[in-house]
Image (cartoon, rainbow, N blue to C red):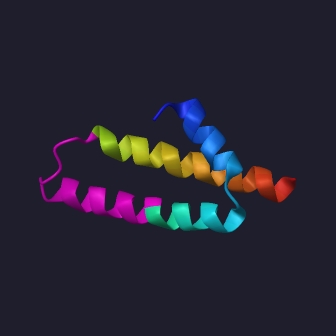
């Protein structure tokens, strides 16, 4: 998914949905780190992508809180 499409999707979501997405992304990051530590992860770039997605979700939450 393109970044602009992802950002518009995030901006259309409610605060509760964003919080649920944040929890899900953090769980995914934990699992990816665990797989990386046990040498089961093939695509290590996925960790960076999930970290950036978490930051984007947190930014969207902050923007909605300030609005």
Numbered disc total: 0
In terms of secondary structure, what is the magenta stretch mainly? helix
Horizontal side of 49 relative to 45 (left or right) equals right
Horizontal side of 11 relative to 53 (left or right) equals right
Horizontal side of 46 relative to 14 (left or right) equals left
- In this view, the residue in front, 34 or 42, is 42
Kindly identify the residue that appears in the image at 54 percent across and 32 percent down. Answer: 3
Q: Is residue 35 magenta?
A: yes
Kindly identify the residue that appears in the image at 20 percent across and 58 percent down. Answer: 35
Q: Residue furthest left?
A: 39
Segment colored magenta: 25-44
- In this view, the residue in front, 34 or 56, is 56
Q: Where is residue 16 in the image (x, y as percent from the top left)?
A: 66, 68
Q: Is residue 45 above or below residue 22?
A: above
Q: Position of residue 57 (x, y in %)?
A: 60, 52
Q: Position of residue 18 (x, y in %)?
A: 62, 60
Q: Is residue 12 above or below residue 27?
A: above
Q: Residue furthest right?
A: 67
Q: Where is residue 50 in the image (x, y as percent from the top left)?
A: 42, 48
Horizontal side of 1 relative to 11 (left or right) equals left
Kindly identify the residue that appears in the image at 34 percent across and 46 percent down. Answer: 47
Image quarter of the N terminus: top left
Q: Is residue 2 magenta?
A: no
């Amino acid at each position: 998914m393109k970044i602009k499409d992802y950002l518009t999707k995030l901006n259309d979501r409610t605060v509760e949905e964003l919080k649920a997405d944040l929890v899900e992304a953090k769980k995914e990051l934990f699992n990816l780190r665990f797989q990386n530590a046990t040498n089961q992860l093939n695509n290590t770039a996925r960790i960076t992508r999930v970290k950036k997605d978490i930051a984007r979700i947190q930014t969207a939450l902050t923007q909605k809180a300030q609005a």
